Amino acid sequence: MPAASGNFEGGLEWESREGFIGIVAAAVKEPDLSPWHVVNAISVVGDVATVQVEDIWLGMHYDDTLTLLWHEGRWQIVSKVFFLRSAG
């Protein structure tokens, strides 16, 4: 099951959790201690939720949709679908 999916630089990204973590680790030399993000929407139905987050990562403006599942007493992210906004 993919953990992160979206269109990026003309191609489809369809990464497993481990693959996505590897991409992030390779791209980030030092963590941003105060990243910009805004939660635009939250929907909860029983033990399933979606969260829409707008953020800037490595200078790129994204809209991320996260799916979460309540499991073992906490919300856990199951997947992420992202949209990269154009620079213009």
Image: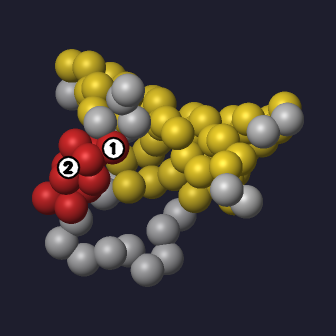
Mark 2 secondary-structure assignment: helix
Q: Residue at x 47, y 30 (%)?
A: 81
Q: Is residue 66 left or right of residue 13?
A: right
Q: Give the x, y percent position of residue 17.
A: 33, 43
Q: Give the x, y percent position of residue 18.
A: 26, 47
The crowding category of the residue bearing disc 2, from other C-alpha atoms within 10 Å (few below 14, some 14 to 19, many at least 20), is few
Amino acid type at mark 2 = Ile
Gap between marks 2 and 1 measured at Cα: 10 Å
| Residues at marks 2 and 1 touching, judged by CB atoms closer than 8 Å | no
Look at mark 2 in the image and give the residue it sits on.
23
Q: Residue at x 61, y 36 (%)?
A: 67
Q: Give the x, y percent position of residue 46.
A: 85, 35
Nearer to the camera, 14 or 36: 14
Where residue 17 is drawn, which disc sits there?
1
| Quadrant of the rendering where the N terminus is positioned | top left
Q: Residue at x 38, y 55 (%)?
A: 57
Q: Is residue 66 visible?
A: yes
Amino acid type at mark 1 = Arg
Mark 1 secondary-structure assignment: helix
Nearer to the camera, 17 or 8: 17
Q: Is residue 84 visible?
A: no
Q: Is residue 77 left or right of residue 81?
A: right
Vertical side of 79 occupied by 28: above or below: below
Instruction: Please report whichever mark, 2 or 1, sits nearer to the chain's N-terminal start.
Output: 1
Where residue 50 is drawn, which disc sits there?
none
Vertical side of 38 occupied by 84: above or below: above
